[in-house]
Amino acid sequence: MAKEKQNKGHYHPLSVVGRDILKIFSKLGFEVATGPEAESGYYNFDALNMPKNHPARNMWDTFWLEPKNADILLRTHTSPVQVRYMEKNKAPLAIIAPGKTFRYEATDATHEAQFHQLEGLMVGENITLSNFKAIIEEFFEEFFEEKKEVRLRPSYFPFVEPGVEVDMRDIGDKKWLEIMGAGMVHPRVLLNVGIDPRKYQGFAFGMGIDRLAMLKYGVDDIRLFYSGDLRLTNQF
């Protein structure tokens, strides 16, 4: 009796993109760090310069797993991984923290209640935003397989000072695309993890893995990544 032909499985596009990102940053000298998806308010907010009643907490729509006074939540970003890593490791250091994050918000073509984020951190002596710009330009060029133009615009995030938005565009293109937030790690964040901000400085950045996948593969609706539709995954 002839054996029934079996179809081979396919990597999900988010898995493909995640794997490529890790390879690139590994070549740039970054280690991978991970942490829990169910977090405490301290690591998700307080240690990142957002103590209780800080207005910046309203920037993140949070899933609380217990009554709010129990202080357990689904992490709204992977920045808590940076805090946990700095508590246990001395500077200099360079890490990326990929993982799933959660926001209590309505879904549409560009927003999901769960999504994958990548955060990066480099701390050492004499680290500047120029170091960050050079690294992120190298990352974009390898990831998109063509040179990209990058600019930094002033912005606000409570855990960095100064903060910037990072825009990217093709060489010669007129339209800029906002791609991530970044900045120099706030001295209070360094103090919270026992690092002397008078000796060490660093930059941190965060970007959406899902959004990078959308840009690279021309997917126009983030919800397709979570639909289970094999017409999408069979392409990879």
Image: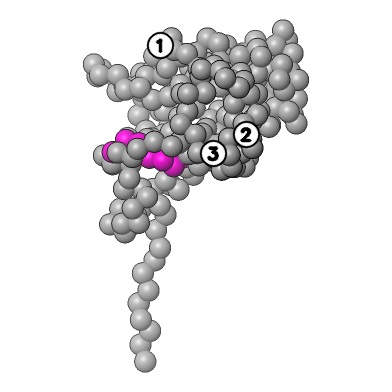
Mark in the foreground, 1 or 3? 3
* Separation of residues labelled 2 and 3 (CA atoms): 10 Å
Q: Earlier in the sequence, mark 1 or mark 2?
A: 2
- Comparing 17 with 139, the one in front is 17
> Does 99 sit left or right of 217 as displayed?
right
Instruction: Indicate which disc residue 69 carries.
Output: 2
| Span shown in magenta | 109-116
**Percent position of residue 59, x then y:** 46, 23
Residue tagged by mark 1?
153
The amino acid type of the residue labelled 1 equals Arg
Q: Residues within 10 Å of mark 1 (few under 14, many from 20)?
A: few
Which quarter of the rendering shows the N terminus?
bottom left
* Separation of residues labelled 1 and 3 (CA atoms): 33 Å
**Residue drawn at the location 31% of the way across and 48% of the way down:** 224
Residue 8, image quadrant: bottom left
The amino acid type of the residue labelled 3 equals Trp
Farthest residue in the bottom direction? Answer: 1
Q: Residues within 10 Å of mark 2 (few under 14, many from 20)?
A: few
Describe the element under mark 3 as helix, strand or loop. Answer: strand
Describe the element under mark 2 as helix, strand or loop. Answer: helix
**Percent position of residue 45, x then y:** 59, 26
**Residue drawn at the location 70% of the way across and 11% of the way down:** 197
The amino acid type of the residue labelled 2 equals Asn
* Residue 106 seen in this snapshot: yes
**Percent position of residue 180, x then y:** 43, 24
Residue tagged by mark 3?
64
Please tell me whether residue 45 belongs to the stretch shown in magenta. Answer: no
Q: Earlier in the sequence, mark 2 or mark 3?
A: 3
Q: Earlier in the sequence, mark 1 or mark 3?
A: 3
Q: Residues within 10 Å of mark 3 (few under 14, many from 20)?
A: some
**Residue drawn at the location 33% of the way across and 40% of the way down:** 107
